[in-house]
Amino acid sequence: MHDFLCPKCREHLRVGENIIFKVKNSKKQSALLLLSPHIGNYTSHKHRTFELQTGESLEYYCPLCNTSLISDIHKNLAHVILLDDSGQSHNVYFSQVVGEHSTFETDGESVHIAGEDAGRYTYFKIGDKFRKYF
């Protein structure tokens, strides 16, 4: 079973079958958002009173240390660390835009791309940006 970590505090974000984030919408309302830990599965769960609009950018935060998870690759991408079953670290970048399906998993040498909207962000290169988190 893969684990997901905050790149800042290195604490675990996965509980059961969900990765848990604190998010803020464009109205600066905060909520917990649960995402599937399976790359390419864009299922999410939130409280029914938390409003989301397709196309709006959310701000993702670690629910434990409250650090912003915005990536240094692109302002629309959040960043977390995936630990695979063998304990190897991979950087995962995913879209913070509601309804946009873009996910990138990299080990520093190659990138696994998922989501029909991923083409919006494939201009970045494999290299030092990916390696600095290992």
Image (spheres, rainbow, N blue to C red):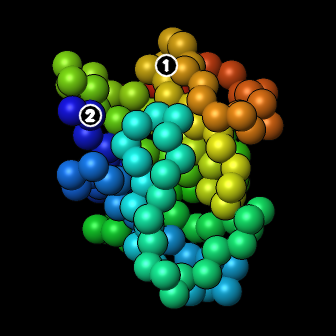
Seen in the picture, residue 119 relative to 41 is either above or below; the reply is above
Query: Which of marks 1 and 2 precedes in the sequence?
Result: 2
Seen in the picture, residue 85 relative to 33 is either above or below; the reply is above
Say which residue appears at 69% left-offset and 79% top-offset.
26
Seen in the picture, residue 116 relative to 34 is either above or below; the reply is above
- The residue to which callout 1 is attached is 108
Q: Which mark is residue 132?
A: none
Residue at disc 1, secondary structure: loop
Image quarter in which the N terminus is found: top left
- Front-lying residue, 11 or 128: 11
Say which residue appears at 32% left-offset and 53% top-offset.
18
- Amino acid type shown at disc 1: Gly
Give the image location of residue 52, x and y in percent: 64, 74
Left or right: 84 as drawn, with respect to 34: left
- The residue to which callout 2 is attached is 2
Residue at disc 2, secondary structure: loop
Give the image location of residue 53, x and y in percent: 71, 72
Say which residue appears at 47% left-offset and 34% top-offset.
39
Residue 81 in view = no
- Front-lying residue, 21 or 70: 21
Give the image location of residue 92, x and y in percent: 48, 37
Name the image quarter holding residue 102: top right
Give the image location of residue 82, x and y in percent: 35, 35
Mark 2 to mark 1 CA distance (whole Å): 18 Å
**How many other residues sit within 10 Å of disc 2, few (<14), some (14-19) or many (≥20)?**
few
